[in-house]
Amino acid sequence: MQQNSLMKSTLVYCVLFVAAAMSVMLYYAATKTVGVTDLAQDEVIRPTVQKDNSAPAVPTGENGIVINRSALNTNYFCIPMPESVKAEEVVLENHYMDKELWVCISTEQPKNYEAFYREGSVYGNCENVTDGRFETEKERICLRFALNGVYEYRSIFEDHTLYVEFVSSKEVYEKIIVIDPGYGGEEQGITADGVLSKNITLDIAKALKTMFDESDIKVYYTRMDDSNPAVADRVELAAATKADMMIRIEVSGDENSKLYGTSAVYNSKFFIPGFGNVELADLLEREVVTSISGKACGLVESAQEDQVVNSATVPAAAIRVGYLTNGQEAILLQREDYIRRIAEGIYNAVVKAYEQREE
């Protein structure tokens, strides 16, 4: 009897303990979540917004977010959230080429939050934030903060406030490279029979992304759409992230349609001890040619028009993946499997570059 009584008492205490533990877990789940979803610019898929051209444009000032810079007693940039917002509804988007942090809140009624951000303010450590405004879309409201540089983020969602800490890329990632798909927008590059170089370089970058996403190498892309960033912005991305190397992707063309093959461009006037521009260019050409079983046209010293390669202050080279003006090579450059093999060559060159740097 005494043993049965002891067992019952133990069972009751266990049930009470589990219930108390569950209550604590539910409380913290409702009030605090560490690690809000964070997306890099190359992971962001922007929804298509249908603009009503008949409606008057809303001045930016009406959508401005007040930044209270009086309190700097914290390492965090503090963004209050409406009480109904849950952590899983918040996504941080790092639009690094625009030097913007987007804090996007999913909601069926985004306009319901407009008054909250018109009347309230953000506060805390705002030294990296130059401006703020919000935009409403179909199923979300986005708080867009202009920054004074390129950053990564650590975040905590607690007590209806999002706390964001700005950190440098090198604090988060040991290996960093920049991939620069050439051309974009109105700058189409070499064209032939309706085929555009800007699309080929972008396809190669997208193939590279699938490979690097599975590696320990962090990649920043100067573009992953049909935009055309300025030369200065492309180069600054490599400097701001303290990238280990920068690789530009280009397509060749010539009046002589018989020319074909792969070459790499480097800046011989900017010397980097150890692993530098010419070493990177040599690796890129060798690995891409090997991957596609192609023809090597050799290394080329940069000309005046090679502005990205000439301006970069990290090891940089441009890989010219083929001649679009050559009929046979033009056909190859439109094939998905050939694009993938070019990307594999560039990927292998980067891996070997890190091996050489560590020797």
Image (cartoon, rainbow, N blue to C red):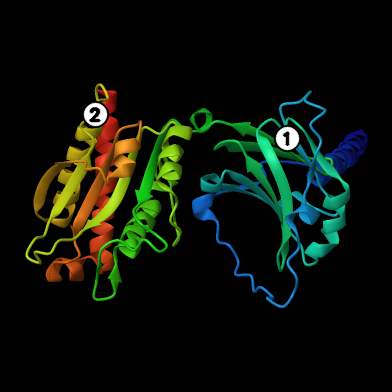
Judging depth in this view, the residue of 75 and 32 nearest the camera is 75
Picture quarter with the N terminus: top right
Q: Is residue 279 above or below residue 346?
A: above
At label 2, the amino acid type is: Gln
At label 1, the amino acid type is: Phe
Q: Is residue 325 left or right of residue 89?
A: left
**Camera-nearest label, 1 or 2:** 1
- The picture places residue 60, in percent across and down from the top left corner, at 73, 55
**Residue that carries the numbered disc 1 in the rendered image:** 77
Q: What is the secondary structure assignment of the residue under circle 1? A: strand
- The picture places residue 232, in percent across and down from the top left corner, at 43, 42
Inter-mark Cα distance, 1 to 2:
40 Å
Q: Quadrant of residue 287?
A: top left
Residue 345: mark: none
Q: Is residue 162 above or below residue 55?
A: above
Q: Is residue 302 visible?
A: yes
**Residue that carries the numbered disc 2 in the rendered image:** 356
